[in-house]
Image (cartoon, helix red, strand yellow):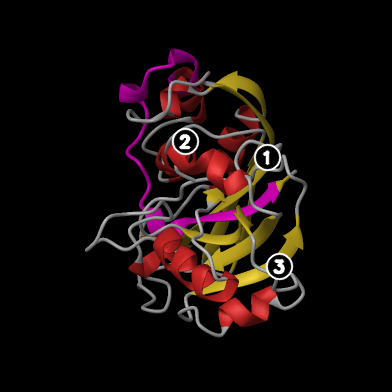
Amino acid sequence: MKPEHKELMKARRRNIQLTVSYDGTAYNGFQRQKPPQIAVQNVLEEKLQLICGDTIELAASGRTDAGVHAFGQVVNFFTDGRIPVSRLPRAVNSILPPDIAVVEAAEADRDFSARHSARSKTYIYRILQGEVPDPFERNYSWHIRRPLNLEAMGECLRLIQGTHDFSAFRAAGGPPVSPVRTMYEAALEREGRIVTMKFFANGFLYHMVRNLVGTIANAGMERISVQRFREIMESLDRQQAGATAPPQGLYLYHVDY
């Protein structure tokens, strides 16, 4: 939502909360972009405007990057439109492209904000492990050819649980917020060739998950030890951590309120 339009939007009768799922492959991230760039927000706002009959400006729980996907992105918007929330998902899905879907809609309290009301978020990151690529996974996972030491990766994940300063995994360019976050759960599971890491925390820094994954993957490929991972984390120095993992393996899974 544009700051200069905030009071105008909040004067409308209804505050609608949506849960949205999307394949981020074709989009330049979630956040609204100027043409010719297209973001998920551009498309959602355009289609919701047709359904609701007035201009729409979304607020979102988070701004996923280009190529990043979502199972459970949450947005809200103010409208004077009269369409019942029970009909809204079907109506907007009928005109959305097939790589974006409104999963759920609800009437929200006047003070609800998809961004500011969020209490915690869950991201997952998928890795395809093995020599042979899978063309059906190329946009949905990071292909690592080398064998992975899953035990070492799991130990690194256990180290990040709890409350820590995550400065070593914070990319430049993000908002000036505290680097201290509480990681409630960090876990790993394998199904066939797919290794999935889950990160459940009270908040995330800019590129934090992808920077964590890039460094944990180095431990999995035995480029660094678990002890070295601990040292990198305690250094608070981004320059010591691994490269940022590619975007296509990352999914915004769930937002809690």
Give the residues in magenta.
Answer: 232-255
Label 1 Cα crowd, 10 Å radius (few <14 / some 14-19 / many 20+) = some
For residue 216, side relative to residue 81 (left or right): left
Sooner in the amino-acid sequence: mark 3 or mark 2: 3
Residue at 43% x, 72% y is: 137
Residue with the mark numbered 3: 104
Name the quadrant containing residue 253: bottom right
Residue with the mark numbered 1: 118
Q: CA distance from mark 3 to mark 1?
A: 17 Å
Q: Are marks 3 and 2 in contact (CB under 8 Å)?
A: no
Residue at 43% x, 14% y is: 235
Sooner in the amino-acid sequence: mark 3 or mark 1: 3
Q: Amino acid at mark 1?
A: Ala
Quick check: is 200 in the magenta stretch? no
Residue with the mark numbered 2: 208
Element class at badge 1: loop
Q: Nearer the viewer, mark 2 or mark 1?
A: 1
Q: Nearer the viewer, residue 35 or 250?
A: 35
Q: Amino acid at mark 3?
A: Glu
Sooner in the amino-acid sequence: mark 2 or mark 1: 1
For residue 231, side relative to residue 108 (left or right): left
